[in-house]
């Protein structure tokens, strides 16, 4: 009888273990719901075993009330065997559940510890990367500041050189204009002096020759009136005609010289006016080119500043994209 009870208990335990293994084999990674169902089954088995244990003492007391009866003896033996099997089932069910729960806890703790170590290592790597990127960002910012200062210095140097070039060109232009004006004044003074000299010579000729001619003509006329022969009259008449022709030729020569001088002065004045107009046009072109250079330089300066601001904005955006958690921290 005892062997039969033991066999039934062992068969019951084997069935429970096989059912538990079947329930655990399809999925090795147990979820929270599966763990709850296992614990619920173990608790149900424990409750059933405890209920049977609580029922057995009453049966014992009833069975021991009739010690002389053989059937009562067999029932008491059977109850004792069931009690033992229930106790064994209780302990055997409790121990694997506790062991599995402890093993699961240890595995979970070990897994959490490894995850914690991995997270610490990754956090350390991220901190190192963050410090490295921060250092690179500082270097880049310092480099950009140095480049900005260098470009500002270059722009200031170019501006100073351009202003100095403009001033030097303006000084050269003023000196050239003054030298040309001085040369024109000198030429004008020479022309005026030459004209005055010619006027004076003309006045001398006009003041002297007509009087002599008048006197000569008067003398010649007196000689003609006082002449007795035709030869003397012819001779004095020829002298008078010769003097008239000479006076006309002298006046024509003086008039031609004066006209040539006036024409030369006119041509010189026209050429000087053309030259001054060309110089004025050239100076206007120089002023226009210098103004265009100044505008181009200011445009380049504004473009370089805009590029620097865009570069700084791009660096900030890249830093925010690489390290978004820095803002949350």
Image (cartoon, helix red, strand yellow):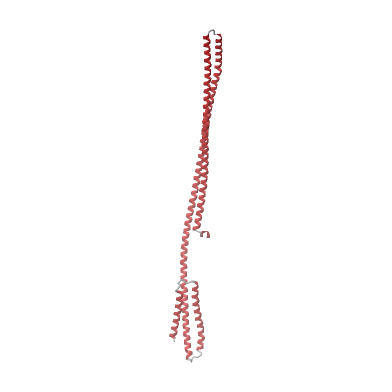
Q: Provide residue 19's location: percent of width, then percent of height.
A: 46, 77
Foreground: 139 or 287? 287
Report x, y in % for residue 187.
Answer: 52, 28
User: In front: 213, or 225?
Assistant: 225
- The answer to whether residue 151 is visible is yes
Regarding residue 186, the answer to whether it shows in the image is no
Q: Residue at x 47, y 58 (%)?
A: 129
Does 213 sit above or below residue 278? above
Q: Position of residue 291 (x, y in %)?
A: 53, 41
Residue 137 percent location from the top left of the image: 48, 54
At 46% from the left and 64% from the top, the residue drawn is: 118
- Rendered-image quadrant of the N terminus: bottom left
Question: Residue most toward the bottom?
Answer: 68
Left or right of 21 on screen, residue 205 = right
Farthest front residue in view: 230
> Which residue is rendered at x = 45% and y = 76% of the image?
22
Who is closer to the viewer here, 309 or 135?
309
Above or below 134: residue 277: above
In this rendering, the answer to whether 239 lies above or below 44 is above
- How many badges with numbers are in the image? 0
């Amino acid at each position: 009888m005892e062997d039969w009870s033991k066999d039934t208990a062992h068969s019951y335990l084997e069935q429970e273990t096989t059912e538990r293994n079947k329930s655990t084999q399809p999925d090795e990674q147990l979820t929270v719901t599966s763990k709850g169902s296992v614990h619920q089954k173990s608790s149900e088995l424990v409750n059933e075993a405890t209920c049977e244990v609580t029922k057995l003492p009453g049966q014992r007391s009833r069975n021991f009330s009739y010690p002389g009866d053989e059937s009562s003896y067999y029932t008491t033996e059977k109850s004792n065997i069931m009690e033992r099997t229930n106790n064994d089932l209780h302990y055997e069910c409790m121990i694997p559940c506790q062991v599995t729960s402890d093993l699961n806890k240890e595995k979970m703790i070990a897994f959490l510890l490894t995850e914690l170590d991995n997270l610490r290592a990754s956090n350390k790597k991220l901190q190192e990367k963050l410090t490295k990127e921060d250092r690179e960002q500082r270097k880049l910012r310092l480099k950009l500041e140095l480049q900005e200062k260098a470009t500002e210095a270059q722009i200031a140097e170019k501006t100073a050189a351009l202003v100095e070039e403009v001033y030097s060109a303006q000084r050269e232009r003023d000196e050239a204009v003054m030298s040309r004006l001085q040369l024109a004044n000198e030429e004008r003074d020479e022309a005026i002096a030459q004209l005055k000299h010619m006027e004076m010579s003309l006045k001398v000729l006009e003041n002297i020759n007509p009087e002599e001619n008048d006197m000569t003509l008067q003398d010649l006329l007196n000689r003609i009136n006082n002449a007795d022969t035709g030869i003397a009259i012819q001779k004095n008449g020829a002298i008078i005609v010769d003097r008239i022709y000479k006076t006309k030729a002298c006046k024509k020569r003086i008039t031609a010289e004066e006209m040539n001088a006036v024409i030369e002065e006119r041509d010189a004045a026209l050429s000087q006016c053309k030259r001054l107009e060309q110089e004025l046009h050239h100076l206007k072109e120089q002023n226009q080119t210098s103004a265009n250079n100044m505008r181009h330089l200011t445009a380049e300066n504004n473009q370089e500043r805009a590029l620097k601001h865009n570069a700084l904005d791009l660096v900030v955006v890249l830093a925010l994209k690489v390290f978004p958690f820095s803002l949350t921290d």
